[in-house]
């Protein structure tokens, strides 16, 4: 329902562009890489021959088979890794106990002597074959071989690293890694694979992969960085390169990987190398699981698969975590700087937006790297200085570095982007005037109708029990304590009195909750709520709610609207159904002014300039609410405090933060889009999720200028992309309480379905400037 009419034509254009891009850019890259491989391997083979002369145990396994070199991996067009397979691992046991993520150790088999091993001098006192000792010895041999081989003028050892790295012809870097091949064995760390309910890969292919096994590499592991482990130097890194290559056969998977690598080399080769070809390969394997059918890997689907992988990549960069395909406990982003990952996320988003908004993007996409541009023009300018003197060198010329540097800031924007933005502003204003205002007026009308009924019910409750005094009053058309969940669902908070003799306790053991405990030296009789205090001195939220539920049920039978209102059974919450159309939840609560919970003490984040300190002071003085309701954070937990705990609520704080700029307008549009297009079975996406992600977006864009009316479209797109990211990660942290997951209790299939629906909606908004007319 969300696809534009011209989507099929656009897909046909994209297929043509993909084939053209593959034929021109990808094949050119592959041809250049193959040429480089032959050049590099000639040198490496010569070095390894010299190593073998000095130490026959290091036999070169770098041989050519039908134009391919066994054990060679292309990291980038200028960087390679060569795996050198060692012999006679037989006297060692493979030990993978999970204590070293992504690593394992080789231990001398019981009853075997060191002298029985070919690698006797590299075995530690504990009987482990040390990866570091072997690598150190190999490094010494390679250094000597570089000085003796026929290519000694072209090859140099790279110092200041424990890895064996060569620089060839000052252009290429090759890492040579000693390794053992482990055939017929499968590590316990990867025992979960394949996932049972996913029909990919085929069982025969799984059997082949597991029989083929994996490799153990003598190299530094990112997973052990910063860990003080006695086994660190002895551990071997697990590698599944051959298994991954085998899994990517069939359909257009290999073609897809080649395109991804080319796009990565041309557009995502960023400082600190946050995105590598291996990340692309890993996400491609996850995409294979999401799309297990062979028909989903036809040539016609390649554009959708690439877009899906880029969205996964944005998700991982935003979450700062990319789990290894076979070893999910191993994070491939470990050791990467947060700022580098954030910058990469922005760059991937620009690239993805370009691919989505411009059917001819692949023809035009190119990025001129700023550093190279500056180096080129500085060289040109220095030549001019030498020739023409200082006067000419001071005059800015067309194409000067300053101009080019400014030009690179918009390098990924299509030429018609500004015009498209103007159209989008018009469409946003039109959508707000027609759809959003219609929704708001309808909701306001419903609120007036609903509140009349609820006020009458609460009057009857107050007659029976004066402690439950109604706080639902109208202030200039707004009702204090009322929250709109959806156009037909509302929550009303009734504020209770006299919390004074109780202490607020927030020790972090109950995510999103806290307890109220009788102050030291105070007696139960001093509290207004004496009968609801437990033997341990806690004011029980469930007991108060149970009593309130009984009172409301009686009030519904006595009030003037008894024919229109019914209590909803089978729930511990106090819920009313009004006129068979509307659902209202009434929640008893305490207002905690002048307090701030320890669970939210991290807020605001120090280095982010939003919100302003004055607003922070206001928010913290205003405080928060404690609600007597079921908390999602306690679902599935067997806690003695579960019934006594009160849910923390920051609705007033959130509303205060969203004042200013077009934030409230943005929220209204998001709620309308949610009600019209994301009201799905199981309710995986709520208005509160939208509000939470809007608050996170405020942190990402802290300046008021970024919340002008002209920026609304970008903010909405950013929030929808955040939502896709959260749905794919199956986690949406609360804004003030990041340990509380707002998706807890939602079904995985519901979240996955929602992610697809949000993606369709986002794609529609990105690809069709008139989308809001139809949505």
Image (cartoon, rainbow, N blue to C red):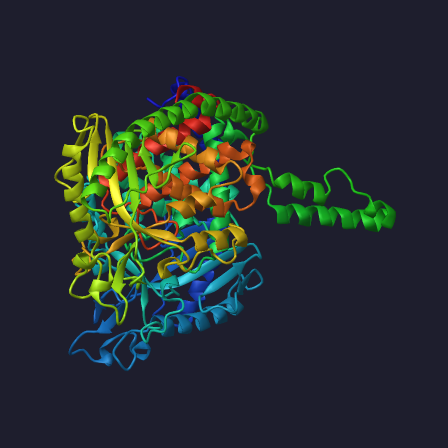
Frontmost residue, 79 versus 10: 10
Q: Quadrant of the N terminus?
A: top left
Q: State whether residue 85 is above or below residue 411.
A: below
Figure quadrant of residue 531: bottom left
Instruction: Let me know if residue 353 appears in the view.
Output: yes
Instruction: Let me know if residue 291 appears in the view.
Output: no
- Left or right, 710 with reference to 137: right
Q: How many marks?
A: 0
- Left or right, 464 with reference to 384: left
Q: In the rendering, at what x and y percent does residue 564 appear?
A: 19, 26
Task: Residue at the far bottom: name it.
Answer: 125
Frontmost residue, 62 versus 761: 761
Task: Residue at the far left: name it.
Answer: 570
- Left or right, 320 with reference to 524: right
Residue drawn at 45 percent across, 55 percent down? 621
Q: State whether residue 150 is above or below residue 211.
A: below
Q: In the rendering, at what x and y percent does residue 322 appear?
A: 36, 51
Frontmost residue, 490 versus 24: 490
Q: Quadrant of the C terminus?
A: top left
- Left or right, 525 with reference to 32: left
Residue drawn at 26 percent across, 41 percent down? 289
Q: In the rendering, at what x and y percent does residue 569 appear?
A: 13, 37
Frontmost residue, 618 versus 408: 618
């Amino acid at each position: 329902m969300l696809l534009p009419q011209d989507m099929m034509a656009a897909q046909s254009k994209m297929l043509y562009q993909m084939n053209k891009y593959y034929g021109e850019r990808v094949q050119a890259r592959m041809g250049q890489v193959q040429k480089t491989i032959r050049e590099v391997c000639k040198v490496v083979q010569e070095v390894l021959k010299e190593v073998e002369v000095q130490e026959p145990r290091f036999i070169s396994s770098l041989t050519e088979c039908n134009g391919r070199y066994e054990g060679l991996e292309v990291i980038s067009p200028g960087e390679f890794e060569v795996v050198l397979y060692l012999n006679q691992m037989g006297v060692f046991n493979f030990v993978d106990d999970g204590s070293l993520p992504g690593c394992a150790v080789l231990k001398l088999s019981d009853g075997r002597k060191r002298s029985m091993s070919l690698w006797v001098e590299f075995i530690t006192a504990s009987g482990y074959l040390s990866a570091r000792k072997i690598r150190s010895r190999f490094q010494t041999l390679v250094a000597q071989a570089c000085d003796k081989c026929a290519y000694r003028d072209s090859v140099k050892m790279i110092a200041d690293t424990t890895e064996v790295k060569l620089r060839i012809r000052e252009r290429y870097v090759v890492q040579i890694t000693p390794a053992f091949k482990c055939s017929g064995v499968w590590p316990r760390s990867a025992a979960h694979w394949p996932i049972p309910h996913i029909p990919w890969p085929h069982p025969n292919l799984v059997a082949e992969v597991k029989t083929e096994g994996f490799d153990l590499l003598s190299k530094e592991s990112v997973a052990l960085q910063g860990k003080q482990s006695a086994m660190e130097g002895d551990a071997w890194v697990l590698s599944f390169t051959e298994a991954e290559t085998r899994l990517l056969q069939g359909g257009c998977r290999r073609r897809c990987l080649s395109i991804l690598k080319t796009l990565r080399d041309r557009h995502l080769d960023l400082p600190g190398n946050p995105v590598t070809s291996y990340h692309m390969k890993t996400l491609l394997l996850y995409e294979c699981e999401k799309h297990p059918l062979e028909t989903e890997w036809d040539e016609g689907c390649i554009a959708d698969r690439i877009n899906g992988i880029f969205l996964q990549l944005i998700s991982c960069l935003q979450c700062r975590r990319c789990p290894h395909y076979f070893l999910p406990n191993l994070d491939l982003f470990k050791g990467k700087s947060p700022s580098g990952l954030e910058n990469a996320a922005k760059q991937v988003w620009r690239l993805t937006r370009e691919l989505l908004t411009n059917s001819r993007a692949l023809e035009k996409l190119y990025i001129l790297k700023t550093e190279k541009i500056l180096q080129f023009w500085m060289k040109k300018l220095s030549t001019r200085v030498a020739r023409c003197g200082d006067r000419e060198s001071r005059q800015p010329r067309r194409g000067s570095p300053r101009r080019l540097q400014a030009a690179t800031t918009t390098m990924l924007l299509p030429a018609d982007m500004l015009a498209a933005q103007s159209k989008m502003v018009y469409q946003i204003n039109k959508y707000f005037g027609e759809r959003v205002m219609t929704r708001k007026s309808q909701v306001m009308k419903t609120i007036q109708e609903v509140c009349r009924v609820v006020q009458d019910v609460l009057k009857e409750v107050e007659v029976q029990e004066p402690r439950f005094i109604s706080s639902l009053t109208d202030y200039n058309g707004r009702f204090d304590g009322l929250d709109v969940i959806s156009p037909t669902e509302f929550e009303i908070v009734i504020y209770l009195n006299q919390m004074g003799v109780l202490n607020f306790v927030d020790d972090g053991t109950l995510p999103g909750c806290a307890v109220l405990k009788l102050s030291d030296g105070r007696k139960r009789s001093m509290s207004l709520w004496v009968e609801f205090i437990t033997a341990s001195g806690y004011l029980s939220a469930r007991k108060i709610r149970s009593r309130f539920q009984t009172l409301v049920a009686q009030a519904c039978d006595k009030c003037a609207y008894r024919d229109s209102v019914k209590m909803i059974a089978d729930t511990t919450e106090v819920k009313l159904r009004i006129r068979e159309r509307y659902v209202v939840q009434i929640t008893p609560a305490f207002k905690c002014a002048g307090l701030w919970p320890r669970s939210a003490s991290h807020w605001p984040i120090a280095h982010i300039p939003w919100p302003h300190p004055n607003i922070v002071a206001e928010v913290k003085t205003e405080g928060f609410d404690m609600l007597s309701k079921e908390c999602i954070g306690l679902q599935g937990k067997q806690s003695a405090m579960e019934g006594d705990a009160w849910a923390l609520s920051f609705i007033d704080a959130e509303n205060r933060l969203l004042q200013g700029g077009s934030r409230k307008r943005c929220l209204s549009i998001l709620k309308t889009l949610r009600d019209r297009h994301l009201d799905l079975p199981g309710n995986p996406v709520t208005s509160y999720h939208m509000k939470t992600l809007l608050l996170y977006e405020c942190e990402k864009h802290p300046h008021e200028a970024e919340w002008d009316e002209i920026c609304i479209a970008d903010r909405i797109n950013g929030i929808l992309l955040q939502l896709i990211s959260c749905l794919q990660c199956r986690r949406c942290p609360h804004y003030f309480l990041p340990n509380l997951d707002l998706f807890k209790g939602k079904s995985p299939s519901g979240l996955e379905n929602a992610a697809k629906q949000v993606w369709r909606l986002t794609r529609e908004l990105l690809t069709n400037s008139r989308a809001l007319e139809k949505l």
